[in-house]
Image (spheres, helix red, strand yellow):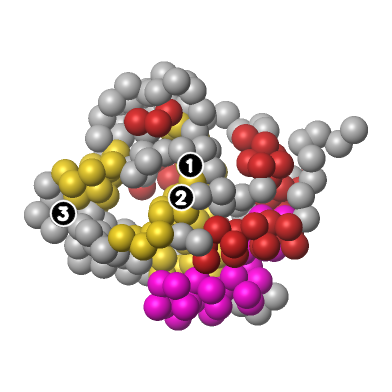
Amino acid sequence: MQYPPIVSADDIERHFLRSVRAALRWDSPYRHWALTDVFPIDLCTGILSLPVCPPNLGQTDGTRNSYNAARCFITPAMRAKFPCCQALSDALQRPDVARLMAETCDIPATGGYLRMEYIQDIDGAWLEPHRDIPEKLFSMVIYLVTGPDAADWGTDIYDANRQWAGRSPADFNSGVIFVPGPATWHGFEPRPIEGVRRLMEINYVRSDWRDRGQLAFPDRPAGLG
């Protein structure tokens, strides 16, 4: 028996497209979309089964850039080693996905480069209110959190004055998409994490993205197969 189960890129693509098409759009405090049932459940199992230890960082400074060396990006090496990483990368690289993201978010998605990070936050992790850089064509977080307190581990959302405005639900296999802009403040307020806060961050980034080692296909933009 194969474990975790192998999911095809075709199944992942169909599942993901259906989720994005059914997403609910909200315009306050800035435009964003809420997704449910984003990935096939067997893909979620595959991601959660990756033999990647959460980085033991202690109390962090509220940024992720301060520990870049400990982050886990879905790179060509990860694709070659783990079938779930290969299938997910292949699915989100496809033209139909790029076209739908372009239409949904009103962005030039085709020609962007796929960047995915598997994040595992443990107690002490937090993120100060920040805006994603414009080199990210869109930002998406998929929550793969479990446990009795996981519902409280969503992303904190702030208004244009950086005042707390709410918190995204962190239901398992749900997600949020937004397009980085001048008012898209978000973060993760300090609070206890008993267990591991697991999520995927997915972006298409512009062709001038400097750290090519973070990209799933460093030599091939999305939408070109």
Residue 125 location, x and y as percent? 34, 31
Q: Which residue is mark 2?
A: 175
Residue 185 location, x and y as percent? 23, 54
| Quarter of the N terminus within the rendering | top right
Q: Amino acid at mark 1?
A: Tyr
Determine the secondary structure under disc 2: strand
Q: Are marks 3 and 1 in contact (CB under 8 Å)?
A: no
Q: Is residue 89 magenta?
A: yes
Q: Are marks 3 and 2 in contact (CB under 8 Å)?
A: no
Q: Amino acid at mark 3?
A: Asp
Disc number placed over residue 2 in the picture, else none: none
Q: Is residue 35 magenta?
A: no
Q: Give the side of residue 132 with respect to residue 137, left or right.
A: left
Q: Which residue is mark 1?
A: 143
Q: Amino acid at mark 2?
A: Gly
- Tell me the CA gap for discs 3 and 1: 22 Å
Q: Which residues are magenta?
A: 87-110
* Residue in view at x 22 percent, y 59 percent: 28
Residue 224 location, x and y as percent? 65, 79
Q: In terms of image quadrants, where is residue 67?
A: top left
* Residue in view at x 77 percent, y 36 percent: 4
Q: Is residue 3 visible?
A: yes
Q: Nearer the viewer, residue 205 or 188?
A: 188
Q: Give the side of residue 60 with respect to residue 2, left or right.
A: left
Labels 2 and 1: the sequence-earlier one: 1
Q: Which residue is mark 3?
A: 159
